Structures are given as C-alpha cells and as structure tokens.
C-alpha cells in the first residue's frame, strides 16, 4: 500500500498556489456551513437536539471566523443571538454575552427577536462582568486558559499562538498539538517513520544494590532516542508569549521515529 502511495505521490505534478488557495477556501466554506446548520435550526425551529454547551461552542467557533460574514446565507445576528442567549441564560458566560448583546443592537431583526434582545441587553447588566472559568478553552501546548472572545488571535492561543483543533461533534478544543515535518521529508516517508514503533516502549532491565545490600531490578520503559525526544520537547516549549510569529514544532526523521504512532494523527 505504501509503495503504491509512493508511486502515486511521485507521479503527481506540483500543485500550484492558486489550486491550494481554492481548496482552502472551499474547505473553510464547508466547515462554516456545516457548523451554521445547527445555529440556523436553533433560531428557526421550536426545538433543538443540541446541548447548550454545543450551541455555545458552535456559535463561538463561527464568530471567530471573519470570512464567514461574507458567505451567502450566514447570519451574524443568528450567531450573536445564540452566543448571547446560551451564554447568559445557561452557561454563565456573562462577559461574552454582554458583548454579543451590544453587537446585536445595530442589526435589523424581526420584532419577536428584537424584544428578546432588548430584554436580554437590560438584564445582562445585573450580571457580573466575568465568564465561567470552566468554559475557557485550554491550550494544550502552554496550558493557558484563553478568553472566550479573542477576535485578533482567532482560533489560536493568545499566549503561544498554537492553532486550536476543534471537534466537529461538540466543537470543543481537542487535546491535539499541530507540528510540521522538515521540508526534505516526503509525506509517505513521514508516515512510515511514525508507524515504525520498534524502538519505542522497550523495557531495559538492570540490577543494582538496594538498601541493606539487597539486589534490586529496575525496569526502564522510556525507550527510544532520548536526544530526539528532548529536541522535540525543546521546540514544543519554545515560544515567545503573545508573538503571532512563533514557530510550530518542526520534526526531523529522528523525532518522527520516536513518536508513538498511537499518539499521532496525520491528515
């Protein structure tokens, strides 16, 4: 199978920048419309099968995509209304809900929704100017609790600018960290290196003298190349707080070989 992939990869012509840009645009539109369907049904149908946390996460995901404003059929008012209602009534995200209600005021909406928006914008003033800490998205690279509203950083950590990876089921931030591979490594070769777990998890046994002169057997299951693992960790921990130009981890062949295959997901 890998040999077939290698031959297919070599046979392919280099992809031009315009084609890649078109693919990225279509992929973004597909993601936005998939997520917005739940918001549309919530605002139009009398009932919804989504939990409040899911609706809130979906609305927050869409609100942090500036390009969605120009997509046909995407209502920013519906997104803000979902954020405000779920944040203020069900989840305790009062700070973000306050912002959403203020942003909703200039929109032209139906009289039924206008009454709810005006009432919500008044009642939210009696709530604390804070968000529920349990809702704050956690960055799994630097362990920073990110604010619910961050239009500048978008879907990235405000501290290390690591991109967030979302679950398209509940739109929660997944415990995944993106990394790149060296330019001289082909994709097929990278897959082979990652899937090669022969040097990972092997136990080494050693005997030594313990307390009272007793023989003690020590099991060390670290396995792999310690230098490569340390190099990956060093890049993982290296970032400039608040710098959007912070580089992601870039792995070489030794690092890829030392990554357990069951901990890596490649697209």
Image: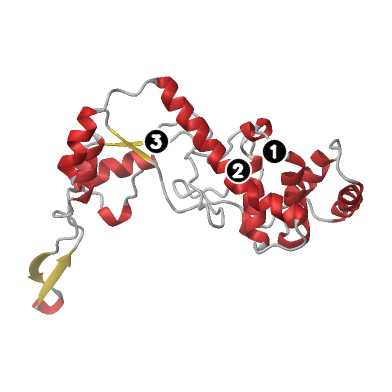
Q: Secondary structure at mark 1?
A: loop
Q: Which mark is residue 248?
A: 3
The answer for how far apart the CA atoms under marks 3 and 2 are is: 29 Å
Q: Is residue 76 above or below residue 16?
A: below
Q: Is residue 189 visible?
A: no
Q: Say whether residue 60 is left or right of residue 24.
A: right
Task: Give whichever of discs 3 and 2 has the lower sequence position.
Answer: 2
Q: Residue at x 73, y 47 (%)?
A: 96
- Is 28 situated above or below 92? above
Question: Residue drawn 41% across and 21% down?
Answer: 17
The nearer-to-camera label among 3 and 2 is 2
Label at residue 33: 2
Residue located beneath label 1 in the image = 73
Q: How far, Cα to Cα, is label 2 from label 1?
A: 9 Å
Residue drawn at point x = 11 percent, y = 72 percent:
217
Number of residues whose C-alpha sits closer than 10 Å to that of mark 1, classed few (under 14), some (14–19) or many (20 or more): few
Give the spatial CA distance, label 3 vs label 1: 35 Å
Nearest to the observer: residue 32 or residue 73: 73
Residue 92 horizontal side relative to residue 162, left or right: right
Q: Secondary structure at mark 2?
A: helix
| Residue drawn at the location 59% of the way across and 37% of the way down | 154
Indicate the quadrant where residue 54 lies: bottom right
Residue 201 % position (x, y)? 19, 60
Query: SS of the residue at dot 3?
Result: loop
State the quadrant of the C terminus.
Answer: top left
Quadrant of res 69: top right
| Circles 2 and 1: CB atoms closer than 8 Å | yes
Locate residue 232, reporting x and y percent.
29, 42
Closer to the chain start, of discs 2 and 1, is 2
């Amino acid at each position: 199978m890998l040999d077939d992939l290698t031959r297919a990869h070599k046979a392919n012509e280099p992809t031009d920048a315009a084609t890649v840009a078109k693919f990225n645009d279509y992929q973004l539109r597909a993601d936005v419309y998939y997520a917005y369907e739940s918001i549309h049904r919530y605002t139009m149908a009398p009932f919804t099968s989504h939990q409040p946390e899911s609706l809130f996460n979906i609305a927050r995901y869409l609100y942090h995509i500036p390009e969605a404003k120009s997509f046909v059929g995407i209502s920013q008012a519906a997104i803000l209304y979902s954020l405000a209602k779920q944040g203020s009534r069900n989840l305790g995200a009062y700070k973000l809900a306050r912002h959403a209600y203020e942003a909703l005021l200039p929109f032209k909406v139906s009289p039924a929704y206008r009454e709810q928006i005006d009432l919500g914008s008044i009642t939210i003033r009696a709530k604390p100017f804070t968000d529920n800490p349990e809702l704050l998205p956690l960055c799994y690279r630097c362990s920073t609790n990110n604010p619910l509203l961050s239009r500048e950083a978008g879907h990235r950590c405000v501290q290390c600018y690591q991109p967030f990876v979302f679950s398209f089921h509940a739109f929660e931030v997944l415990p995944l960290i993106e990394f790149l591979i060296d330019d001289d490594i082909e994709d097929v070769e990278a897959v082979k290196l990652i899937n090669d777990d022969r040097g990972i998890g092997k136990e080494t046994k050693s005997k030594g003298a313990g307390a009272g002169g007793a023989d003690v057997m020590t099991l060390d299951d670290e396995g792999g190349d310690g230098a490569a693992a340390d190099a990956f960790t060093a890049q993982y921990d290296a970032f400039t707080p608040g710098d959007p130009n912070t580089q992601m981890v870039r792995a070489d062949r030794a690092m890829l070989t030392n990554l357990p295959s069951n901990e890596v997901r490649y697209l």
